[in-house]
Structure formats: C-alpha cells, structure tokens
Image (cartoon, helix red, strand yellow):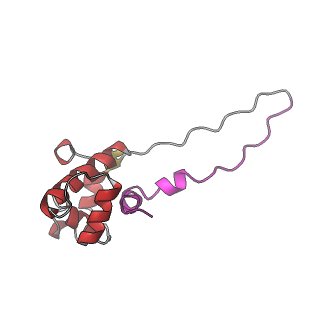
Amino acid sequence: MSIFGSILSKIFPSANAATAPAAPAAPAPSGAPAAAAPPAAITVVDVEALLDGMPGASSLNWRTSIVDLMKLLGLDSSLDARKQLAAELSYGADTSDSAKMNIWLHRQVMTKLAANGGKVPAELRD
C-alpha cells in the first residue's frame, strides 16, 4: 500500500468497507422493475477532532509537522518514507531540501484529506 493510502486508511478506516461488494439484491417480483441498491452513505470525518483525540496527540505538533502527523498515525516518518510520499504526491522540487518538502507534504496531505471527505480547517490546507 502507498504511504498516502496508509494515511487515508488511518483517517478513513471505513473507506475499505465502503468499497466492498454489496450483497446481491433480491430478485424483483415478476413484471416489476429491479430496484437499484441505495447509494452508500458518505460520512464526513472531522480530521482535526479525530487527530486531536488520538493517544499522544497533545505531545505532537501534527498541525504543522508531517513528521509528527505520520508518527501520530503510527506510520514510518523517516526521510526515505517522506521522499516516497513526495513522489506519490508528485512533488516537483528538490527533495534534499527536507524543510521545504515537509511543509509542502503536510499541506498536500491535508488538502487531499479534505478532497477525500475529510473536514480539515482551511488554515491547514493549500
């Protein structure tokens, strides 16, 4: 699984269940049109509240640090892992400038969480 995929699965754990195939619908009575399955309910996740409620959140600066965000989620936050995440998210600048890359990564992750159904404060997004 990609690093960003791992982040998504930590924030939206039910996303995998939502993509599971549904049970087949019962056959429609003779002559009646088949009923379509109802769409899956989309749940908005309050990312800030979720992360604030995680054990260890008060000792980590996850709001501005990609390293602390990854640590909070129990993910590898090494430079190599962050470079891999940068490649996944199409970072176009030099990855040897880790400070610049880290700021970009954090904002991109927050923006993508919002795009995937997360409620993320505007000041944390691009």
Q: Quick check: 108 above or below 102?
A: above
Magenta residue check for 75 = no
Residue at the (13%, 61%) spot, across then down: 99
Residue at the (25%, 72%) spot, across then down: 78
Question: Which x, y percent locates residue 107?
Answer: 21, 50
Quadrant in which the C terminus appears:
top left
Question: Which x, y percent locates residue 28?
Answer: 79, 35
Residue at the (53%, 56%) spot, across then down: 17
Q: Which residues are magenta?
A: 1-30
Residue at the (56%, 38%) spot, across then down: 39
Q: Is residue 119 visible?
A: no
Question: Which x, y percent locates residue 61?
Answer: 15, 63
Quadrant in which the N terminus appears:
bottom left
Closest to the observer: 110 or 59?
Answer: 110
Closest to the observer: 91 or 68?
Answer: 91
Magenta residue check for 24 = yes
Q: Is residue 25 left or right of residue 87?
A: right
